[in-house]
Image (tube, grey):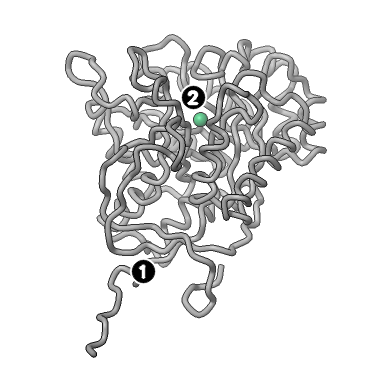
Amino acid sequence: MSQQPPDAEGVPTAVFHMPVDPHVHLRPDNDPKDHRFEAVVPVVASYCQIAGAMFNFENPPASQARRARYCIDAQELAAQAGYPDFRVFGVPLLNDNYRRDDIARLADEGVKSVKLMICGTTTGSSHGVSDLRTLKQRGVFREASKHGMIVQVHCEEPGAHPLEAEYEAWNKWLKQLIIGNPDLTAIVEHVSDHRTMEGIEEIGRNNVFASITYHHLVLTYSMIYNADSEVIDPNSITKPIAKSSESQGYLIHTILTNPQVIVVSDFAPHKIEDKQCVNPASGCANFPAGPLLLANLLASYDAINYGGKNLFNELTSRRAATIFGNKPEDRYRLEYRPGQTLIPETASSGTTVVPLWLGKQTIPNRLVRVPYDPKRHEPV
Ligand SMILES: [Zn+2]
């Protein structure tokens, strides 16, 4: 009997840590009309070890006890689905009621970061901040600086043209906020415009970071809308929207060269009916596509190992773990293997509520979550 050839698909070409992703949307956990939480938590858990959950939805959990419950619910759900190591931390959304004392209290309660989003920017942002000046006058950002609390900023100007909204917000208020608070640790979230990135790099502060999403690295505006402004791909509509190929090229350059940058998912699933309609909802569900597309992108630049470091790990786990002071449990690895990945039409079997970005397309190579094996894998 002839021997079977070795399984070429079983041999990883690279091995990665499970991502630490400080920007995901797991959706409401207690809305009887909305079953996205149950559908998406296992999907996120299969591509993240630690996730920061955003609370920009109706009736966000207002107390720390309630936010903690939300995180435990997500972890229990993940454990039932076979992801016992999945950990979630909550990111409270700042609003007009916040005072210095609230920040001090959150810091006492162990909250590591808060989200700053101006009302009217995107989904659920009506619970955000309408008057940034008042928050500044009350010393909210000075207090956050004092406690080393990170401010994760959605940088878009409400009502502006989608292609200009980010840069307008950067110029109008975010640049000043950052310059005026030199001790504030800030992450400018999901940077999509090369002008914003250049502005962040010009300030060049080691406590100011930029996050870039998986989808902004591979999308441009012309892949989502045609020349008549008709939607070609509703699943890829996000806020901020993907920009020009010039911006996309600059974001790729940035992940290769700038150590102040992390890659996040901004995983934001919607129901099929909210995407396949006249005004599709903003947000894309970029697992399982995102991390694989990043690995393929880095591989295409021969940059998975760059400057003596595993750049995929730097971008998706190591830097975020350092910024947020997280210690990943490191019980699993993502093996990058040859083969093909078929992106499914829905997030998990038995549900039709969550279309995944790039539904039904095939992407080269695979990322396979496997238990950490000291014989096969490098230690942390
Ligand atoms: Zn988001």
Residue 162: % across, % down: 36, 17
Locate the N terminus and report the quarter of the image it occupies: bottom left
Would residue 78 be found to the left or right of residue 362 on screen?
Answer: right
Whether disc 1's CB lies below 8 Å from ligand 1 is answered no
Cα distance, mark 1 to mark 2? 38 Å
Taking depth in this image into account, of 143 and 69 the one nearest to the observer is 69
Q: Residue at x 74, y 15 (%)?
A: 97
Pick the residue in front: 231 or 320: 231
- Crowding at label 1, few (<14), some or many (≥20) Cα neighbours within 10 Å? some
- Name the amino acid, label 2: Cys
Disc 1 element: loop
Report the amino acid beneath label 1.
Pro
43 or 171: nearer the viewer = 43
Residue 10, horizontal then vertical, whole percent: 35, 70
Q: Residue at x 47, y 39 (%)?
A: 211
62 vs 15: above or below: above
Q: Which residue is mark 2?
A: 155
Which one is earlier in the sequence, the residue at label 1 or at label 2? 1
Q: Residues within 10 Å of mark 2 (few under 14, many from 20)?
A: many
Q: Is residue 146 above or below residue 118?
A: below
On screen, residue 187 above or below 161: below
Question: Looking at the image, which is closer to me, 244 or 82?
Answer: 82
The residue to which callout 1 is attached is 12
Q: Quadrant of residue 199?
A: top left
Q: How many marks?
A: 2
Residue at x 54%, y 56% (from the top left corner):
318
Which element carries disc 2, helix, strand or loop? loop
Residue in view at x 40 percent, y 34 percent = 197
